Amino acid sequence: MKYLALLATAAVMLLSGCATTIHSDVTAFNAWPADLQDKTYAFEAPQGADDTLEYRNYQVLVSNELGKLGFHQAAGNQQPKLLVGMKFSTIDHPVRVLEADDPFMGPYWGPGYGRYSAWGYSRWGYRPYFYDPFRYYGPLMVEERIKHEYQRQLRVTINTIDGRKLYDVTVQNTSRVQATPHVMPALVQSAFVGFPGVNGVPRKVDLTIDPKTETVDATPAKAG
C-alpha cells in the first residue's frame, strides 16, 4: 500500500503546484436581441435545499462574468429587466481498477550477461525495464483500486422579466478533480466565452486555473 500513499501525495502536489486545465463541453442557445439597451438583472431565488452558501458563492462568479459583458445587478429598489437562473450538479462515478505490479521491474547496476533492457510505460511513467532471465522476480501482484470520475454540469439562463427566453447555456465537465469549488470558476467562465455565441453549436472550451491565485486564465487554452 506504500505506493498508493506516494501516488496520493504526488496528486496533491500536482494540484497545488501545477496549473490545472479544465476541459468543458459548452452548448448555448440564444435569441439575443441586437437592440437590448437595459441590462439590469436579478437572480432567480434558489428553491429550498438549493439555497446554500455554496450556491450563493457561485452566483457571485456568474455576476462577475456578467459584469464583464456590461450587465448590472439591480439595486434593491430597482426593477430589473432580466432574470438570471443558475443550476449545477456533481455526480461521482467510481470505477473499479485492477492494477498489477510489474514482476520484471528490478534494480539495475549496469550491463551484464543475460540481462535485457528496454524503455516502456508503467504506472510509474516512462522508464527503463530490466529483465534478467536467470533471476526469479516473484509472483505477479494484483491490487484493486477505486478511481473517481466527477461529472459536473452548470446551466445558466437569462430571460426577460416577462418570461421571454434570451440565453440558455449548458457546460459539462468530467475530471478527477474532487473539489467542485476548484472547478466552478472555469465552468462559469466557459459559459460566457464568446457570448452570446453561435446558436446551438456545441464546442469545447479549455481554461487553465492558476494554482497560486485560484483564478482562471482569461485567455482560453482552446475554444472550438
Image (tube, rainbow, N blue to C red):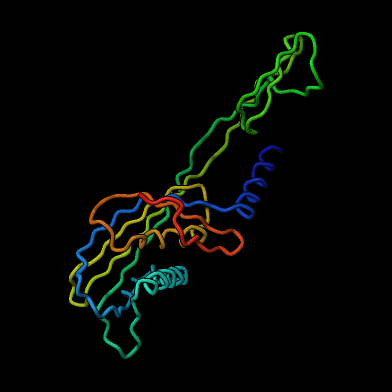
Look at 33% across and 71% down and name the residue there.
47
The extreme bottom residue here reads 77
Q: Quadrant of residue 143?
A: top right
- The percent position of residue 66, horizontal first and vertical second, equals 36, 71
In this view, the residue in front, 135 or 61, is: 61
Q: Quadrant of the N terminus?
A: top right
Q: Is residue 153 above or below residue 74?
A: above
- The percent position of residue 177, horizontal first and vertical second, equals 52, 51
- The percent position of residue 151, horizontal first and vertical second, equals 42, 49
Question: Left or right of 80: which side holds 176?
Answer: right
Question: Left or right of 197: which side holds 109?
Answer: right
Question: Left or right of 210: which side holds 9?
Answer: right
The extreme right residue here reads 109
- The percent position of residue 48, horizontal first and vertical second, equals 36, 71
Look at 38% across and 60% down and name the residue there.
88
Look at 65% across and 33% down and name the residue there.
124
In this view, the residue in front, 59 or 125, is: 125
Q: Is residue 217 above or below residue 133?
A: below
Look at 63% across and 51% down and name the residue there.
12
